[in-house]
Image (cartoon, helix red, strand yellow):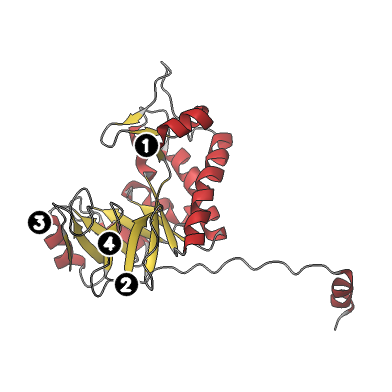
Amino acid sequence: MTAALVSACSSGAAAPERPPHVVRPTADADFDYQIGGPYRPPSGVRAVARDRGAAPARGLYNICYVNAFQAQPDALDWWRANHPDLLLRDAHDRLVIDEDWDEALLDLSTAAKRARLAKIVGAWFDGCADAGYQAVEPDNLDSYTRSQGLLTSSDAVAFAKLLAGRAHAAGLAVGQKNTAELLSRHAATGFDFAVAEECARYDECGQYASAYDDRVFVIEYRAADFARACRAWGARLSIVLRDLDVRPAGAKGYVRKAC
Protein backbone atom coordinates (compact mmCIF):
# COMPACT_ATOMS: atom_id res chain seq x y z
CA MET A 1 0.00 0.00 0.00
CA THR A 2 1.47 3.35 -1.00
CA ALA A 3 1.91 6.19 1.43
CA ALA A 4 -0.67 8.22 -0.46
CA LEU A 5 -3.25 5.44 -0.16
CA VAL A 6 -2.46 4.94 3.53
CA SER A 7 -2.96 8.64 4.06
CA ALA A 8 -6.29 8.62 2.24
CA CYS A 9 -7.54 5.61 4.19
CA SER A 10 -6.43 6.95 7.56
CA SER A 11 -7.99 10.33 6.89
CA GLY A 12 -11.35 8.80 5.99
CA ALA A 13 -11.31 10.39 2.53
CA ALA A 14 -14.11 9.03 0.36
CA ALA A 15 -13.27 7.45 -2.96
CA PRO A 16 -14.66 9.40 -5.91
CA GLU A 17 -18.04 8.14 -7.04
CA ARG A 18 -18.19 6.37 -10.38
CA PRO A 19 -20.69 7.88 -12.81
CA PRO A 20 -23.81 5.77 -13.37
CA HIS A 21 -23.60 3.28 -16.22
CA VAL A 22 -25.53 4.46 -19.28
CA VAL A 23 -27.04 1.73 -21.45
CA ARG A 24 -27.64 2.73 -25.05
CA PRO A 25 -30.38 0.96 -27.01
CA THR A 26 -29.50 -1.69 -29.55
CA ALA A 27 -30.25 -1.21 -33.22
CA ASP A 28 -33.35 -2.79 -34.78
CA ALA A 29 -35.11 -3.64 -31.50
CA ASP A 30 -38.85 -4.27 -31.96
CA PHE A 31 -40.37 -1.07 -30.62
CA ASP A 32 -43.64 0.42 -29.42
CA TYR A 33 -44.46 4.09 -28.97
CA GLN A 34 -46.88 4.53 -26.09
CA ILE A 35 -46.65 8.20 -25.12
CA GLY A 36 -50.42 8.60 -25.48
CA GLY A 37 -51.09 6.07 -22.71
CA PRO A 38 -49.44 2.85 -21.51
CA TYR A 39 -50.70 -0.63 -22.32
CA ARG A 40 -49.30 -4.14 -22.37
CA PRO A 41 -46.62 -4.21 -25.08
CA PRO A 42 -47.31 -6.57 -27.99
CA SER A 43 -45.40 -9.85 -28.10
CA GLY A 44 -41.85 -9.47 -29.29
CA VAL A 45 -41.46 -5.83 -28.30
CA ARG A 46 -38.10 -5.15 -26.63
CA ALA A 47 -38.17 -1.35 -26.33
CA VAL A 48 -41.00 1.01 -25.43
CA ALA A 49 -41.38 4.77 -25.03
CA ARG A 50 -43.85 6.09 -22.45
CA ASP A 51 -44.71 9.44 -20.91
CA ARG A 52 -42.78 10.27 -17.76
CA GLY A 53 -45.98 10.02 -15.73
CA ALA A 54 -46.35 6.33 -16.62
CA ALA A 55 -44.51 3.39 -15.09
CA PRO A 56 -41.94 1.66 -17.32
CA ALA A 57 -42.70 -1.75 -18.85
CA ARG A 58 -41.10 -4.52 -16.83
CA GLY A 59 -38.22 -6.34 -18.52
CA LEU A 60 -37.97 -4.03 -21.53
CA TYR A 61 -35.73 -1.15 -22.58
CA ASN A 62 -37.77 1.88 -21.50
CA ILE A 63 -37.52 5.39 -22.93
CA CYS A 64 -39.06 8.20 -20.87
CA TYR A 65 -40.84 10.90 -22.88
CA VAL A 66 -40.30 14.42 -21.50
CA ASN A 67 -41.57 17.62 -23.10
CA ALA A 68 -38.37 19.53 -22.39
CA PHE A 69 -38.54 22.55 -24.70
CA GLN A 70 -42.23 23.48 -24.43
CA ALA A 71 -44.86 23.61 -21.69
CA GLN A 72 -47.63 21.03 -21.67
CA PRO A 73 -51.04 22.80 -21.84
CA ASP A 74 -52.11 21.37 -18.48
CA ALA A 75 -48.87 22.61 -16.90
CA LEU A 76 -49.05 26.19 -18.16
CA ASP A 77 -50.62 27.52 -14.95
CA TRP A 78 -47.76 25.97 -12.98
CA TRP A 79 -45.18 27.69 -15.17
CA ARG A 80 -47.00 31.01 -14.90
CA ALA A 81 -47.20 30.77 -11.12
CA ASN A 82 -43.66 29.52 -10.47
CA HIS A 83 -41.44 30.53 -13.39
CA PRO A 84 -43.24 33.13 -15.54
CA ASP A 85 -39.99 34.54 -16.90
CA LEU A 86 -39.03 31.14 -18.32
CA LEU A 87 -41.91 31.27 -20.79
CA LEU A 88 -40.94 32.79 -24.13
CA ARG A 89 -42.74 36.07 -24.91
CA ASP A 90 -42.81 38.26 -27.98
CA ALA A 91 -42.27 42.02 -28.20
CA HIS A 92 -45.87 42.56 -27.03
CA ASP A 93 -45.37 40.35 -23.95
CA ARG A 94 -47.54 37.61 -25.43
CA LEU A 95 -46.65 33.96 -24.98
CA VAL A 96 -45.16 32.33 -28.06
CA ILE A 97 -47.31 29.29 -28.75
CA ASP A 98 -46.83 26.14 -30.80
CA GLU A 99 -50.20 26.31 -32.49
CA ASP A 100 -50.25 22.65 -33.53
CA TRP A 101 -50.21 21.41 -29.94
CA ASP A 102 -51.22 24.55 -28.01
CA GLU A 103 -47.94 24.53 -26.09
CA ALA A 104 -46.09 27.60 -24.86
CA LEU A 105 -42.40 27.67 -25.77
CA LEU A 106 -39.81 27.81 -23.00
CA ASP A 107 -37.30 30.66 -23.08
CA LEU A 108 -33.84 29.27 -23.94
CA SER A 109 -32.43 32.60 -25.02
CA THR A 110 -29.80 33.10 -22.30
CA ALA A 111 -27.33 30.87 -20.49
CA ALA A 112 -28.88 31.79 -17.15
CA LYS A 113 -32.36 30.77 -18.25
CA ARG A 114 -31.09 27.56 -19.82
CA ALA A 115 -29.36 26.66 -16.56
CA ARG A 116 -32.55 27.23 -14.56
CA LEU A 117 -34.61 25.23 -17.03
CA ALA A 118 -32.07 22.40 -16.95
CA LYS A 119 -32.54 22.11 -13.19
CA ILE A 120 -36.31 21.82 -13.61
CA VAL A 121 -36.22 19.37 -16.51
CA GLY A 122 -33.29 17.55 -14.93
CA ALA A 123 -35.41 16.80 -11.89
CA TRP A 124 -37.93 15.16 -14.24
CA PHE A 125 -35.09 13.07 -15.68
CA ASP A 126 -34.15 12.00 -12.15
CA GLY A 127 -37.76 10.89 -11.69
CA CYS A 128 -37.51 8.80 -14.86
CA ALA A 129 -34.34 7.14 -13.59
CA ASP A 130 -35.83 6.49 -10.16
CA ALA A 131 -38.87 4.88 -11.80
CA GLY A 132 -36.67 2.44 -13.69
CA TYR A 133 -36.31 3.95 -17.17
CA GLN A 134 -33.07 3.39 -19.09
CA ALA A 135 -33.34 6.40 -21.42
CA VAL A 136 -35.06 9.70 -21.99
CA GLU A 137 -36.32 11.50 -25.11
CA PRO A 138 -36.53 15.30 -24.60
CA ASP A 139 -39.19 16.48 -27.03
CA ASN A 140 -39.43 19.65 -29.13
CA LEU A 141 -35.75 20.22 -29.81
CA ASP A 142 -37.00 22.03 -32.90
CA SER A 143 -39.06 24.59 -30.94
CA TYR A 144 -36.67 27.32 -32.06
CA THR A 145 -38.16 26.98 -35.56
CA ARG A 146 -41.52 28.09 -34.10
CA SER A 147 -40.10 30.91 -31.95
CA GLN A 148 -40.76 33.80 -34.34
CA GLY A 149 -37.01 34.27 -34.59
CA LEU A 150 -36.57 34.75 -30.84
CA LEU A 151 -34.56 31.54 -30.40
CA THR A 152 -31.74 30.12 -32.50
CA SER A 153 -30.51 26.63 -33.26
CA SER A 154 -27.49 27.42 -31.07
CA ASP A 155 -29.83 28.12 -28.15
CA ALA A 156 -31.46 24.73 -28.69
CA VAL A 157 -28.14 22.89 -28.93
CA ALA A 158 -26.77 24.61 -25.82
CA PHE A 159 -29.84 23.59 -23.83
CA ALA A 160 -29.78 20.07 -25.25
CA LYS A 161 -26.16 19.73 -24.17
CA LEU A 162 -27.12 20.62 -20.60
CA LEU A 163 -29.95 18.09 -20.71
CA ALA A 164 -27.71 15.35 -22.10
CA GLY A 165 -25.22 15.91 -19.30
CA ARG A 166 -27.98 15.78 -16.70
CA ALA A 167 -29.43 12.59 -18.23
CA HIS A 168 -26.05 10.86 -18.26
CA ALA A 169 -25.43 11.87 -14.66
CA ALA A 170 -28.68 10.10 -13.78
CA GLY A 171 -27.61 6.97 -15.67
CA LEU A 172 -29.92 7.59 -18.61
CA ALA A 173 -29.16 7.43 -22.31
CA VAL A 174 -30.60 10.43 -24.14
CA GLY A 175 -32.18 10.51 -27.59
CA GLN A 176 -32.35 13.24 -30.19
CA LYS A 177 -36.01 13.81 -31.01
CA ASN A 178 -36.47 14.75 -34.67
CA THR A 179 -34.72 17.88 -36.03
CA ALA A 180 -32.59 16.35 -38.77
CA GLU A 181 -31.08 19.76 -39.47
CA LEU A 182 -29.12 19.44 -36.21
CA LEU A 183 -27.71 15.96 -36.86
CA SER A 184 -24.31 17.38 -37.71
CA ARG A 185 -24.07 18.62 -34.10
CA HIS A 186 -25.26 15.46 -32.38
CA ALA A 187 -21.84 14.34 -31.12
CA ALA A 188 -21.06 17.68 -29.49
CA THR A 189 -24.49 17.70 -27.89
CA GLY A 190 -24.10 14.24 -26.38
CA PHE A 191 -27.08 12.36 -27.79
CA ASP A 192 -26.87 8.55 -27.81
CA PHE A 193 -29.66 7.57 -30.22
CA ALA A 194 -32.57 9.13 -32.10
CA VAL A 195 -36.34 9.07 -32.06
CA ALA A 196 -37.42 10.13 -35.54
CA GLU A 197 -41.02 10.80 -36.43
CA GLU A 198 -41.90 10.48 -40.11
CA CYS A 199 -38.32 10.22 -41.35
CA ALA A 200 -39.50 8.14 -44.31
CA ARG A 201 -42.09 10.74 -45.23
CA TYR A 202 -39.39 13.42 -45.33
CA ASP A 203 -36.59 11.17 -46.65
CA GLU A 204 -34.44 11.61 -43.52
CA CYS A 205 -34.06 8.06 -42.19
CA GLY A 206 -30.65 7.60 -43.77
CA GLN A 207 -29.31 10.70 -42.11
CA TYR A 208 -30.40 9.48 -38.68
CA ALA A 209 -29.07 5.98 -39.35
CA SER A 210 -25.67 7.34 -40.34
CA ALA A 211 -25.42 9.66 -37.34
CA TYR A 212 -26.45 7.08 -34.75
CA ASP A 213 -25.14 3.78 -36.13
CA ASP A 214 -28.72 2.57 -36.69
CA ARG A 215 -29.79 3.27 -33.09
CA VAL A 216 -32.93 4.94 -34.39
CA PHE A 217 -36.56 4.51 -33.37
CA VAL A 218 -38.82 5.48 -36.27
CA ILE A 219 -42.50 6.37 -35.90
CA GLU A 220 -44.58 6.77 -39.06
CA TYR A 221 -48.20 7.91 -39.03
CA ARG A 222 -49.20 7.14 -42.62
CA ALA A 223 -49.40 3.62 -44.03
CA ALA A 224 -47.60 4.51 -47.26
CA ASP A 225 -44.69 6.08 -45.36
CA PHE A 226 -44.52 3.09 -43.03
CA ALA A 227 -44.34 0.71 -46.00
CA ARG A 228 -41.58 2.82 -47.55
CA ALA A 229 -39.63 2.85 -44.27
CA CYS A 230 -39.92 -0.92 -43.92
CA ARG A 231 -38.73 -1.53 -47.48
CA ALA A 232 -35.71 0.70 -47.14
CA TRP A 233 -34.78 0.39 -43.47
CA GLY A 234 -36.75 -2.46 -41.91
CA ALA A 235 -33.67 -4.67 -41.56
CA ARG A 236 -31.67 -1.98 -39.76
CA LEU A 237 -33.90 0.41 -37.81
CA SER A 238 -36.70 0.05 -35.24
CA ILE A 239 -39.86 1.10 -37.12
CA VAL A 240 -43.46 1.32 -35.99
CA LEU A 241 -46.71 2.64 -37.48
CA ARG A 242 -48.88 4.47 -34.96
CA ASP A 243 -52.03 6.55 -35.04
CA LEU A 244 -51.34 10.27 -34.80
CA ASP A 245 -52.73 10.50 -31.25
CA VAL A 246 -50.72 7.41 -30.17
CA ARG A 247 -53.80 6.00 -28.43
CA PRO A 248 -53.49 3.02 -26.07
CA ALA A 249 -54.49 -0.42 -27.28
CA GLY A 250 -58.24 -0.93 -27.08
CA ALA A 251 -59.07 2.73 -27.67
CA LYS A 252 -61.03 3.71 -30.77
CA GLY A 253 -58.65 4.65 -33.56
CA TYR A 254 -55.67 2.73 -32.16
CA VAL A 255 -53.16 1.69 -34.83
CA ARG A 256 -49.91 -0.17 -34.31
CA LYS A 257 -47.84 -2.20 -36.76
CA ALA A 258 -44.16 -3.05 -36.92
CA CYS A 259 -41.97 -4.18 -39.82
Which residue was labeled with disc 1?
74
On screen, residue 12 above or below 108: below
Separation of marks 2 and 4 at Cα, in angstroms: 14 Å
Q: Nearer the viewer, mark 2 or mark 3?
A: 2
Pointer 2 or 1: first along the chain: 2
Q: How crowded is mark 2: few (under 14 residues within 10 Å), some or many (20 or more)?
A: some
Point out the frontmost of discs 2 and 4: 4
Q: What residue type is labelled 4?
A: Tyr
Find disc 2 in the rendering and name its residue.
46
80 left or right of 103? right
Question: Which of 157/69 is in front?
Answer: 69
* Secondary structure state at the residue bearing disc 3: helix
The image position of residue 96, as x and y in percent, is 37, 27
The residue drawn where x is 47% and y is 47% is 160
- Quarter holding the N terminus is bottom right
Residue at 31% over, 53% down: 35
Q: Name the residue under label 3.
A: 224
- Give coordinates of residue 41: x percent, y percent: 27, 67
Query: Is 183 positioned to the left or the right of 4 in the image?
Result: left
